[in-house]
Image (cartoon, grey):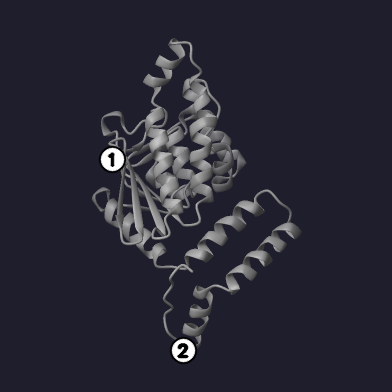
Amino acid sequence: MTDSVLRDTDGAVATITINRPAARNALTNQAKAELLAALRGCAADPGVRAVVLAGAGSAFCAGQDLREHADLAAAGGDPLRTVREHYNPLVLTIAGMPKPVVAALGGVAAGAGAALALACDFRIAAQRASLLMAFARVGLSADTGASWTLQRLVGAARAAELLMLAEPVDSARALELGLLTAVVPDEELPAAAAAFAARLAAGPTLAYAAIKESLRYAAGHGLAEALEKEAVLQDQLAASQDHRAATDAFLRKEQPSYEGR
């Protein structure tokens, strides 16, 4: 990857880092394109079984780079084309990735940065981290999936409050609301996120992928359709090596070993 987005792989865990610390990892069009390429690369790599999404320095991601946004508008361009061209594909790639994605929030996650974290399957945060649904502060509505993910995490009323009032939520409150999976001391975040991802990478990857798919499907369908989707996915998983190995290990009263196939 280039300097704006870094990718590092340790075993079956890939770490993607937004690397613009001087700008609190605010996203330019170039950074968004590189981030999407990195995420798609991890999704397609069979050797990667879990992904950590992080930000360099003291922030996770401050969202859209407003300097570039203003420059594009001043030049007569349409800066909000980025919603369809960049942010929507980013969210769909994270949500549709057939492996778990863990956001490691080392500091502020604002606007689209917060929404990207919410699109991940898990969020491990440093104590100093905060989330800010900043869209209304610049006269905009929600994007990057925030209208979809936020209310599913905290309910419609709380989502409206967070989006309309646009006030920062510290890590303790975010954990209480259900926006975070865990909060750890600042200095422990990299190790904690890596350990959490390693645990997922050692697990039943195919089952995790099916769980993600079934949750996405059920969010937009009725009970009968969701039941049928579950049955279809279970039929597929029943033929997997991981299922057979786990069943055999259970009968032997041993811990299963998963290979993701």
Task: State the residue at coordinates (55%, 27%).
Answer: 141
Task: State the residue at coordinates (51%, 41%).
Answer: 91
Task: Tell me the amino acid under the disc marked 1.
Answer: Ala
- Number of marks in picture: 2
Q: Which residue position holds label 1?
A: 56
Task: Tell me the amino acid under the disc marked 2.
Answer: Arg
Percent coordinates x, y for residue 260 in the rendering: 46, 67
91 versus 30 height, above or below: below
Percent coordinates x, y for residue 51 in the rendering: 39, 53
Q: Residues within 10 Å of mark 2 (few under 14, many from 20)?
A: few
Q: Which residue position holds label 2?
A: 252
Q: Residues within 10 Å of mark 1 (few under 14, many from 20)?
A: many
**Disc 2 on helix, strand or loop?**
loop
Percent coordinates x, y for residue 199 in the rendering: 38, 65
Percent coordinates x, y for residue 235 in the rendering: 64, 70
Q: Quadrant of residue 231?
A: bottom right
Q: Is residue 150 visible in this depiction of the protein?
A: yes
Task: State the residue at coordinates (50%, 56%).
Answer: 98
